[in-house]
Image (spheres, coloured by chain):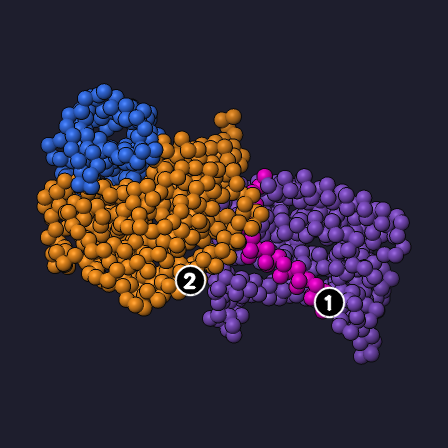
Chain colours: A blue, B purple, C orange
Amino acid sequence: MIPVESESTSKEGTKIVYVSKENLFAYMKERKDEGYDILLMVTGIDYKDHLEVVYHLLSTSTGNRLIVKTKTDGEVDSVVPLWAGANWHERETWDLVGIKFKGHPNLKRILLAEGWVGHPLRKDYPLDKKQYVNLKENGEDYVSYDPREGY
Amino acid sequence: MNLFFFLMSILYGLLKFLHINFIPYTWDGYPVGLWIAYLIISAVEVILVFAIAMIVVVILVYVFRKYMADLQNRIGPNRLGPWGTFQLIADVFKLLQKQDIVPANADRLAFKIAPYIVFTPVILGFILIPFGNVSILNLMVTNFQYTVLFLVAVMIVSPLGEIIGGLSSHNKFALYGALRSAAQDIGYEVPMMISIISIVILAGSYSANAIVYAQRNLPFIIPEILGFIVFFLAMIAKQSIPPFDLPESGSELVSGFSTEYSGMRYGIFYMANFGFMALASFVVATLYLGGWEGPFSLIPGLVWLIIKAAVFMIIFLLSWIALGRTRVDQFLNMGWKYLLPLSILNLIISTGLAFYVGGWF
Amino acid sequence: MEDKVIEVNFGPQHPSTHGVLRIKVKLDGEIIMDAYPVIGYLHRNAEKLSEMGAYPKALIYIDRLDYVASLNNELGYVLSAEKLMDAQVPERAQWIRMMLVELNRIASHLVWLGTHGLDMGMLTPYFYCWRERERILRIFDEITGSRLLYNYFAIGGVYSDITPKAIDMIKEFLSDFGSKLEEIQAIFAKNYIYVKRTRDVGKLSLEDALSYGVTGPLLRASGKKWDLRKNQPYLYYDQVNFDIPVRQEGDVYARFQVRIEEMRQSIKIAQQVISKIPEGEFYNKKFSKPMLVRLKGTGDSYVPTESPKGEYGVYLVGDGSTIPYRVRIRSPSFANLSALPIMLKGYKIADLTATVSSLDPVFGEVDR
């Protein structure tokens, strides 16, 4: 058994488990073997002093749900080897919250253009700076602050 | 040709009657006046056929839109002119006004002539259809011994235009459309020709007129039912309308070979599509339903032919409206594994029929 | 081998990408070697926008996620927010919600069915589907005041009561939609070409489906009997009687069958609900309109709901203020679409449009 840091319940009654960053992958592997076959989503939350990654797990055989949380400073292990569906969710978390996932096969931005400056769901993201996206000749995106250069 | 001599003799008689004797010598056995008349009448005939073809296309497009709208709980064109009849004319003018865009990397010459390669066979095909007879004269523009052979030759030209247009566009979707067009042509043309050969064997002539005459007792659709099925499916594939609209396939390849075309060049593709639908209905009616021959001669032959062709046009439209699209491999499977054996079987049957009861046809 | 492969961009402007999906496809002739979906062309960051106003204000962004099933979206948000604020909801409001959500599920599936027909090259069923959907939209117009984006479910109830006229409209719709659905189904299911093109196409095994987090009709078409309305009932789904359609094949045709059957079950549910709506308040008096912007939430909550596309829910984190601290939308289309590459590999170009449309992706929801 991988030790958990603390336990609580969310408002709708799902068990919440805090796991240390180092133990995360091992703990998730244990849960996967236990029967949690669907990873519903990966969420990143910016608490200003630290970042938190939240995993929602679901077992379709028993109907159990579990929320796993990890405090981090910006990098955690990827769970793509366990659930293939984590791929896009982790890319999105990297894109919008800026949490790196170690061992992810293709950690690129997914919703925003490649080359975007900053991560919008961070609390300190500057909302007054507009960025404009355009395509280079080779089909890659690029981003600029100049409104004449993009859309 | 009969019509030509008919009109020519009238003109010549007219000239004689008016004592206009400007024919001082003859050339090649005919007076020069006859040659002038020949040129004039040929020009008139070509314009006439073009006009007939265009009128048929216009009517067909209008009927298609209204009929389709009716089946789909819509109203269809209803703004311009009475019951929206001028809609197509407005559309054509809209297309004419549009900028003629040629993609930067396209093969310009090939890109520009491709629509005409697709469209010309439609007009050429109309020249070869016997539209009926007036007393002893056949109502057709040209009549010679190998009309059906020439018709087939004309009809297999138009896919070449699609392939040229697709390849010259420098667009991947157009490339795929062209490749599909090529694959599809090979798939249906062989069975189509074999089923035409069966008809030729049964009628004993390559002439469309003779084929119509051979059906005065029994339309070929009855002894040639297998050939009819093969030919009809081939005609649907030839027009590339659903279920066999693989070269265009709107939802897969954007617009297939015509992806890069806009303005009137696209309009020509569009007209060629409907023109071919009209031509195909006339051809099927001529080859399998006895052309302008009708059960009673009170109604003129032209009307009989139009009635028969209209039935097929409606069937083509229904197929367009109601059916989905097949996959390329499914179509090729059908062409090679079912249509080809069927057409060969049909060829054997018609050879037997021609051998044993040939005189009856 | 390498020089035979052509790379084609399907989209973002392509007639059958249901909006703005772009798929980079590697093709060997007609066969798909590899597919790489590119998304984000409709990204508006609804999550960030929702974090900038009071709790009820986020609803207008939630509306615009899955714009063909807005009420289903609102339901997920509203249920989560109510849990966050420990709000009690009057019974009548819950039953109204249930009925409208089921009607919206039918509307969403009709949109899917029509566009699916278009992708298969069938022009006509589209209009039949739109005709039926139009009647549902008229009902919504009567009840909520708008046709597409309703903003009708409020925290603590619904914004307005349903009228007797709306009840009559719903009853009339439910009474003859079944036969209309049968007709529409026949256009597809009795069409040899359609069946031939969708059988054994875009196959998704159950293991892959679970691994990719695929839910909803796709999961049920792959052989898992999993429907949150039955397995983890919310609202009053435990008090109504309905079945969960399941197919084992996992191909496009199975998804078609599952969705058609789901529409039937939705009719069944709505018919039961309409007779069970109790009299009473349609919103909680504690959450009257002026109060709504002053609602405070603490802790975190995530109430999963079964939207037409799969498991949908909004994970809300509150910090005790009137503004949500973090809003995370679990959109089913996003997870379903991520499984697209394995469904396409080895099939033909023509199967691409069939498979993509069988996922029923709505890009307001995928890109958020």
Residue at (22, 48) in percent of width and height:
C79
Give the vertical position of B196 relative to B4 (above or below). above
Instruction: Say if residue C275 shows up in the picture.
Output: yes
Magenta span contains residue B318: yes
Quadrant in the picture for residue B125:
bottom right
Q: Specify whether A105 is left or right of B268.
A: left
Residue B6, image x, y percentages: 81, 69
Q: Which residue is mark 1?
A: B304
Task: For residue C64, say whether it is visible.
Answer: no
Q: Residues within 10 Å of mark 1 (few under 14, many from 20)?
A: many
Which residue lies most toward the bottom here?
Answer: B18
Q: Which amino acid does the dot numbered 1 rest on?
A: Trp
Magenta range is B303-329
> From mark 1 to mark 2, how far is it between C-alphas?
48 Å
Q: Nearer the viewer, residue A85 or A59?
A: A59
Give the letter of the chain under mark 1.
Answer: B
Discs 1 and 2 lie in a common subunit? no
Residue C4: image x %, image y %?
Answer: 52, 30
- The residue located at (16%, 50%) in the rendering is C87
Q: Amino acid at mark 2?
A: Ser
The x, y position of residue B211, in whole percent, is 80, 57
